[in-house]
Amino acid sequence: MATTEPEPVAERDLTMSRAMVEAVATEMRENDEVFVMGEDVADYGGIFDSTQGLLDEFGRDRVMDVPISETAFIGAAVGSAQAGMRPIAELMFVDFFGVCMDQIYNQMAKNAYMSGGAVNVPMVLTTAVGGTYSDAGQHSQTLYGTFAHLPGMKVVVPSTAYDAKGLMHSAIRDDDPVVYMFHKRLMGLGWMPAPPGPKTPVPEEAYEIPFGEADVKREGDDATVVTLGLHVHRALEAAAELADDGVEAEVIDLRTLVPLDTETVVESVRKTGRLVVVDEDYRSFGVTGEIVARAAEGALSDLEAVERLAIPDVPIPYARPLEEEVNPATEDIAAAVRRTQG
Amino acid sequence: MSEEPGLVAVDSAAVWPDDAADVDEGVVANWFVREGARVADGQTVCEIQIEKVSVDVPAPAPGELVERLVPENGTFRRGDPLARVRPD
Amino acid sequence: MFSDMVTARYYEERLQEEYLEGKQPAFDISAGPIPGELHLAAGHEAAAAGVCQHLRDDDTVTAPHRPHHVAIAKGVDLDRMTAEIFGRRTGLCKGKGGHMHLFDPDVNFACSGIIAQGCPPAVGAAMAAKKRGTDGVAVAYLGEGAIDQGGFLESLNLASVHDLPVVFVVEDNDWAISMPKERVTDVKNGAQRADGFDMPGVRVDYNDAVAVYEAAAEAVGRARAGNGPTLLEVQVHRHMGHFMGDAEAYRPDDEVERLKRLDPIDRLADRLRAEGVDEERLGELRAAAERRVEDAIAFAKEQPEPDPEEAYDDVFADPPEPAAKPGTAAADGGGDE
């Protein structure tokens, strides 16, 4: 065999957690200013495997376990970012933002603007979101709308391993604060099996996915389903069922909420005339209302039917029948799409 | 096809964790390599879960992963081969 | 005290068995009869029993995410608590709260899944007692991992400056999930936190119920007499993982075995024997505790699951609208979607 033939290229699929970690590790190798801090990010490797293996390669100085003092360590990430470093701070569950929100929304998110652009805050705040495993009201929220509502933070919600890696590269390289919200059920944890879909082929090399570009995960002419996170996969499953009945749903994965890709949504609505928005956050004053408003602003005359599915303005309950009732299921999505076909 | 000579098994017993020594069954939590795909020596081909412990399983040799013997979320017994690799 | 401790221990052992049902050979958090996460407190019993012995039903206790032993010592209804943990309609919280969020107003017990966030409400209960002129006290439980959290430190100050009848009980099990204490705080003795707030700080160095009982007598007595708050730290041991899916790869292999030799229940049993309690009596107490736990688990498993429609109840004590499923035309005030 000729020695000039290239080595066979390994082909692999990755879970979302491994794809995230691969991006973080690559950035850490290339840039000494990148470091990770959070609770249980070192020896444990992140409760949801978001930092698995980083301690072994980078040591405790760059992969720091910190006290359960979110105000202090997230604020410290803000300060070190303003000093020019590129910290990645992990808020273990997004639900814990309550103990440290000032550092997030009054400091991290506003310092660029309030300094008139004199400073910027190039940090990533990673955080686990979502329910489906009976962790009840203080550990199951997504709070997508809360973070997207408050100006000054870019907000990223990956739904596949491929997207997770590219969005993480973009997040670390971005000069602004990025809230990177990963859904626990999509991470590919052995103890919390993921649905089919989030595990995808992932290139070995680094690549960026630009913010503000939604991804059409499935094309269709009959209805537009706009969603994000876990519900991308529920929507795709619903779309497959609907296709059996001759209804072709287009599934748009927003991928980033800030910036929001209005154009892709509006274009799709112009084509289908029917909009279904699916969200795992609370219904009122959130993602569903925002998407419907953007569609109305951009394609009012094309809109023939609108449906939205979200958590119906109740805290997430613990018992399985209760949680299943409030979290939009595949069948709920299929039914909503059917209602738009009248 | 598993009769083909020269195939190398991905051995589940070789990676069995010490703290699960008293357990005889596991589950394949994730496959990372599809059938027919190439693997590098030592590349993680799958992740197995034994009770609470998760373990990465390396390829025994560089080559082609010709067959997965346990499906994702499927159960296997300790010592069962998980896949077969046709070495280069 | 012994009964509370053996009840709590047997309870956690039995819940572990029930919880792991359906989670073999691989642990899947969504499988089995008990939903969600489970944080068990085997090895923590002395801190609960030793303090709660001094409390009445009208005294308030707040507990963190690892609450069962404290709830048992406080006298929470075991049947309804167990039904809640199994996610049943007749549980303490109708299946809405679950194991980290148990509320029993009959004995003024509550817990929260957010680190240190039970401290401010305990201060509030103490404030209410003081304003009303009762001699009620409040006890806030937290783990040693929580002593670096603002909610705790702010509560110490508020309680101190108003001389409120609160006892803060830090259960020091040396581990904040995977983080050993020395990696996240520079004080070995968490009771030293009291020094900055002008209140007594006491540490019980051994996982010993009698020592806890004695220290708590003084702390609760001080609060009840109107002399203000105390910070009490108790050494306990975590015999199990942080939560039941925790593989504990970060933990030295022999640590749990070593700690089990310091079991607070064995220690108290030895003390009782030395005081003349015979083996038969100890056996009776254990048997009674086991029966009580088995009855509670049997009760829980017989209870119905909640009806899905109940998910919409209880958001408000005084609902602003006639109850209607949000998202329906009625809830949206009509409409023609």
Image (spheres, coloured by chain):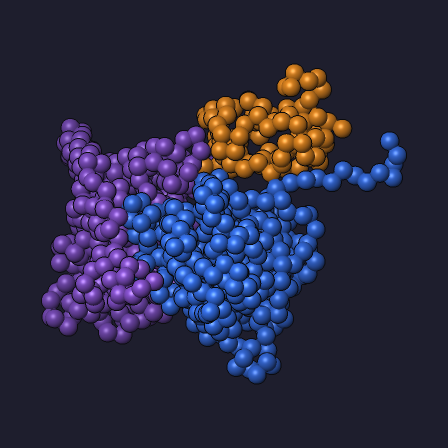
Chain colours: A blue, B orange, C purple
Q: Nearer the viewer, residue A292 or C129?
A: A292
Q: Is residue C182 left or right of residue A311?
A: right
Quarter assignment of residue C110: bottom left
| Residue at 52% across, 33% down | B72
Q: Looking at the image, can residue A126 be seen?
A: no
Q: Where A114 falls versus A45 (above or below)?
A: below
Q: Is residue A280 left or right of residue C12?
A: right
| Residue at 56% across, 66% down | A263
| Residue at 45% across, 43% down | A245
Q: Nearer the viewer, residue A263 or C65?
A: A263
| Residue at 31% across, 40% down | C34
Q: Nearer the viewer, residue A68 or B48?
A: B48
Q: Quadrant of the N terminus of chain A?
A: top right
Q: Where A256 falls versus C253 (above or below)?
A: below
Q: Is residue C105 left or right of residue C185?
A: left
Q: Looking at the image, can residue C320 be seen?
A: yes
Instruction: Please state the horizontal and vertical placement of residue A74, each as a whole percent of the image.
Output: 49, 65
Q: Nearer the viewer, residue A81 or C180?
A: A81
Of all residues, the one furthest to the front in this rendering is A342
